[in-house]
Image (spheres, helix red, strand yellow):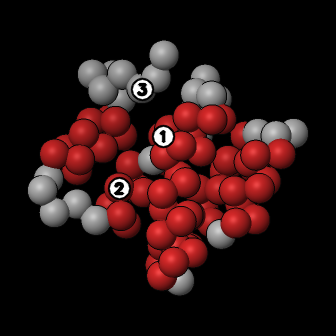
Amino acid sequence: MGIDPSDNTDAKLGIILLKKKNINSNEYLVTLHPLINNADIPLDTKIKELLPFVQQHAAKGDTILGNQLAQLCDNLVILHPNEAKAHAIYADI
C-alpha cells in the first residue's frame, strides 16, 4: 500500500526532489503532503516521516520549518481526529 509514483504526479515530484543531492528539509516537507493526506496510509507511518523534522524544529526553532510542519500536522489531525498521536505530534511543534 502507498503512493504509486506511476499514477501520482505528486509522488513523481517527490521522487525527483529526493534524487537531488542538495535537497533541504523544506523541499522534502512539500513532498509529504500526499502522504499525510492519504487516508489509506497508517498514522504511524506518517509520524515516522514527520518526527525527525519535529525534532529538528525543536532543536533549531526554525520558523519556516515550524510553519510547514503546522500545515502538515493540521491536515494530520483533520484526517485522524480521534488519534491521540496525531494531536500529540501537532502539540510538539
Looking at the rendered structure, the kind of residue marked 1 is: Pro
Residue at disc 1, secondary structure:
helix
- Marks 2 and 3 close (CB-CB < 8 Å): no
Could you say where residue 62 lies in the image, as x and y percent from the top left?
48, 82
- Residue 34's disc is 1
Label 1 crowd (10 A; few <14 / some 14-19 / many >=20): some
- Marks 1 and 3 close (CB-CB < 8 Å): yes
Disc 3 target residue: 3
- Marks 1 and 2 close (CB-CB < 8 Å): no
Residue at mark 2 to residue at mark 3: CA–CA distance: 16 Å
Give the residue at x 65% y 69%. 93
Label 2 crowd (10 A; few <14 / some 14-19 / many >=20): some
Label 3 crowd (10 A; few <14 / some 14-19 / many >=20): some
* Upstream in sequence: badge 1 or badge 3: 3
Give the residue at x 12% y 56%. 21
Q: Is residue 85 visible to the viewer in this orientation of the structure? A: yes
Residue at mark 1 to residue at mark 2: CA–CA distance: 12 Å
Could you say where residue 13 lies in the image, as x and y percent from the top left?
27, 44
The image quadrant that residue 22 belongs to is: bottom left
